[in-house]
Image (cartoon, rainbow, N blue to C red):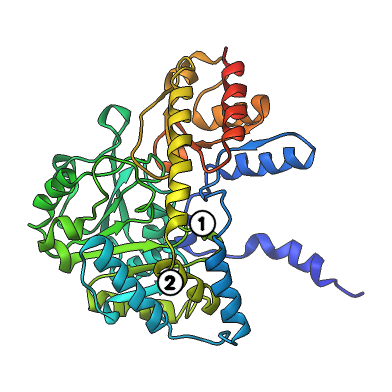
Amino acid sequence: MAIHSSNLSSKHSSKHRLSNRVQAVKPSATLEITAKAKALKAEGKAIIGLGAGEPDFDTPDHIKTAAINAINSGFTKYTAVGGTAELKQAICDKFKRDNALNYTLDQVIVSSGGKQSFYNLCQAILNDGDEVVISAPYWVSYPDIVILAGGKPVIINTGIDEGFKTTAKQLKAAITDKTRLVVINSPSNPTGITYTRSDLKAMGEVLKDYPDIIIASDDMYEHIVWSDEPFCTIADVCPELYAQTITMNGVSKAYSMTGWRIGYAAGSETIIKAMTKIQAQSTSNPCSISQAAALEALNGDQTCVKTMLKAFKERHDFVVDAVNNIPNMQALPSQGAFYTFVNIQSLIEQTEGINDDVEMSDYILSEAEVALIPGSAFGAPGYIRISFATSMENLQQAIERIRKLFA
């Protein structure tokens, strides 16, 4: 009798052994909400999604044209693993122009998104048991990428009362003889909070006493800032930390190029070379066409950045004001990115049958048909993240639905 391979696979798949490292990565707290939102949309429900971490604008035409020209000219082969020389030069020029940081081509790597830049860094510098200091609320991928590299995330918890900022005192207390990496994300995903020069200077005073600690400065939202003080990054504010800082950025957010998958990092030539070695054995070079588009994004007309920034600021002002007019919800004004991080702990406590932010997000999705991300996904239970990377009309409808639900 013939044995069908599909039956055999089904019978024995449960016995397949998975690695300890992948089992240490926790399933995303948002998966259930995301799956349910998709299912409800498929049923014809008018779901408004406020979870997306990407601009709703199209990629600007001049950037798309550069990509089309690259295809038509046959720029469709492998490039150097760490990116083309032309794009690396544009990145060096950008760092000098915007951040007063001087790098050579050998100090730059281009990766398939900012996430890969951070992944490469952790794989390149962490050994088993090395500690990585991360402030919560944090971008969802930081802790798991650290775990996949054998490291141990050390979380500094901050809340709305602290303005979601880690202080120099907290940073000092979190550092041990096992600390290898400190992560700074400003403007922050998920809070939009931005560190000032004085904030970074205070942190720098702590870190300069630990020259063996690497600092990962994630500046992905650099150009989406509306604070009175211009954006600043720690290697510029504290030149003495230049040698131990890896400054990470990309074109995804500022130029609405999330799907093009181009991130980049600059810093110590030794570390960048090690990161390139990791990339060579994983993805190899980033997409050649995307690199051509990124080159135009960095070197071309920057009007598109200002246009999107104006819209994000208007949406931010509306959302913060509207949320703070809903009982038992509290939001701080932020200085950048396109998120509002809302304290809903009082709302949870006063809503019968709801025990935490994950259940509250599910309740809002089911009853108000608005998809939000629970704060637990960012290491901050009792909060929700609202993305205002969508139209003002969608935001107005969504906030009104939530207001009616809890009226």
Residue 326 x %, y %: 49, 17
Whether residue 73 appears in this view of the structure is yes
SS of the residue under disc 1: loop
Please give the residue where the numbered disc 2 appears in the rendered image: 111
Residue 278 x %, y %: 39, 77
The CA distance from mark 1 to mark 2 is 17 Å
Evaluate if marks 1 and 2 touch, with contact meaning CB atoms under 8 Å apart: no
Residue 228 x %, y %: 26, 40
Q: How crowded is mark 1: few (under 14 residues within 10 Å), some or many (20 or more)?
A: some
SS of the residue under disc 2: strand
Q: Quadrant of the N terminus?
A: bottom right
Identify the residue at image location x=18%, y=43%: 199
Which of the labelled discs sits on residue 256, or is there none?
1
What is the three-letter code of the residue carrying label 2? Ser
Q: Residues within 10 Å of mark 2 (few under 14, many from 20)?
A: many
Identify the residue at image location x=14%, y=57%: 177
